Structures are given as structure tokens and as C-alpha cells.
């Protein structure tokens, strides 16, 4: 997954033949990005901080895949277009 510099981004992705909706929002107060994931209008996870070198979804047993970034820095307003998330076990 790649991102734009828009403060709020919404997109869908098909993973394991299932459609997931992703909402990525920049928090200007604390200066970090968060992500929410839903499926069929039901929120599966919300407020996930976009950090690097961490399996972001490992605590969510209801999501059958994980996402990780190998970018050298956590996502911020200046580098979000370079920040990518890779699918793990999907």
C-alpha cells in the first residue's frame, strides 16, 4: 500500500478474496498517521498508528492478515508518500 499526502485517505483492497476498506488520517496535534480497517461496513480496527518495523495488526485476531513497513522512519507528514505497507500472510 502506498499513500498520498492528503490528510484523510480512503481506499479499498481485495485481500484473500475479501474486500477491506482502509481509512488513513493524519493527526496534526500529535503529528502522526493512523489507520482504520473495516469490512462490509463493520469496523475491525481503528486508530492504528503507522509505525515501521512492526506487525501492525498482530493484536487483531479478527483480521486474517498483517501489514508491515520496512521504511527507516515512522510515517509523518513529510514522508508519507514514501511510506509503504507490505502485506504479510495475506
Image (tube, grey):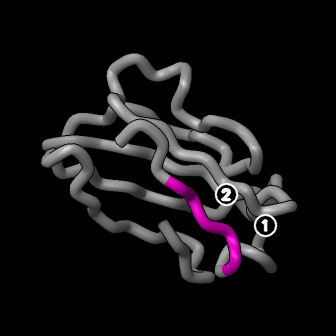
Q: Nearer the viewer, residue 7 or 19?
A: 19
SS under mark 2 = strand
Indicate left or right for 23 with 29 as reference: left
Decide: marks 1, 2 in contact (CB < 8 A)?
yes
Q: Which residues are magenta?
A: 82-86
Q: Earlier in the sequence, mark 1 or mark 2?
A: 2
Q: List x then y, in percent, for residue 83.
A: 68, 69
Disc 2 marks which residue?
Answer: 33
Q: List x then y, in percent, for residue 5.
A: 62, 82
| Quarter of the figure with the C terminus | top left
Which residue shows up at 61% across the image and 51% down it? 34
Indicate left or right for 15 with 83 as reference: left
Q: List x then y, in percent, for residue 59.
A: 54, 20
Q: List x then y, in percent, for residue 88.
A: 48, 42
Which residue shows up at 35% across the image and 29% down it? 63
Q: Main secondary structure of the magenta part?
A: loop
Q: Is residue 62 above or below residue 10?
A: above
Indicate left or right for 62 with 77 as reference: left
Image quadrant where residue 32 sits: bottom right
**3D distance between C-alphas at marks 1 and 2:** 7 Å
Q: Nearer the viewer, residue 37 or 87?
A: 87
Which labelled disc corresponds to residue 68?
none
Indicate left or right for 47 with 37 as reference: right
Disc 1 marks which residue?
Answer: 76
Q: Residue furthest front?
A: 89
Q: Answer whether residue 79 is magenta in the image.
A: no
Which residue shows up at 56% across the image and 40% down it? 47
Q: Is residue 62 above or below residue 37?
A: above
Which residue shows up at 29% across the image and 54% down it? 21
SS under mark 1 = loop
Q: Is residue 69 above or below residue 57?
A: below
Amino acid at each position: 500500500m502506498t499513500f498520498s499526502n492528503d490528510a484523510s485517505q480512503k481506499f479499498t483492497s481485495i485481500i484473500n478474496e475479501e474486500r477491506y476498506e482502509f481509512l488513513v488520517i493524519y493527526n496534526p496535534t500529535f503529528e502522526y498517521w493512523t489507520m482504520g480497517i473495516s469490512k462490509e461496513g463493520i469496523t475491525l480496527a481503528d486508530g492504528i498508528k503507522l509505525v515501521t518495523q512492526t506487525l501492525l495488526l498482530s493484536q487483531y485476531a479478527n483480521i486474517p492478515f498483517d501489514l508491515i513497513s520496512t521504511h527507516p522512519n515512522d510515517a509523518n507528514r513529510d514522508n508519507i508518500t514514501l511510506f509503504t505497507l507490505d502485506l504479510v500472510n495475506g
